[in-house]
Image: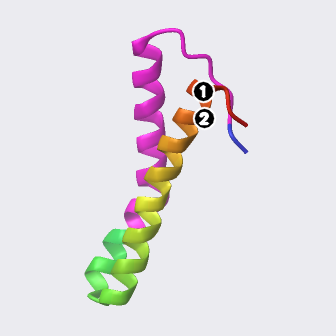
Amino acid sequence: MMDTRIIDSRDDFAQWAIDRANAILTDHGSDLATAARGGNEAQIGETAQALGQAIVDALLEAFDGLMGGD
């Protein structure tokens, strides 16, 4: 579920972007670090893909919000 936030200024948007980046790194960054320490290339690839997808999803969320999408 997506939280609704009113963006009235560049500062509001910057804060939203910082908050989303922190959430993404909290959710996926430690998984990537763990996979990298383990040295399993398949696991590194999967966790990197999940991190990348989370970034794409955040960008689409921002775009949808700007366009008034669902």
Q: Disc 2 and disc 1: Cα gap in Å?
A: 5 Å
Identify the amino acid type marked 2.
Asp
Identify the amino acid type marked 1.
Met
**Res 18 label:** none
- The answer to whether mark 2 and mark 1 are in CB contact below 8 A is yes
Q: Residue at x 32, y 90 (%)?
A: 40
Indicate left or right for 46 with 3 as reference: left
Please check the rendered image and state whether residue 9 is part of the magenta-colored stretch, yes or no: yes
Q: Residue at x 43, y 78 (%)?
A: 46
- Give the residues in magenta: 3-31
Indicate left or right for 8 with 30 as reference: right
**Res 67 label:** 1
Count of labels shown? Answer: 2
Q: Residue at x 60, y 35 (%)?
A: 64
Q: Main secondary structure of the magenta part?
A: helix
Q: Dot 2 lies on which element?
A: helix
Q: Which residue is mark 2?
A: 64
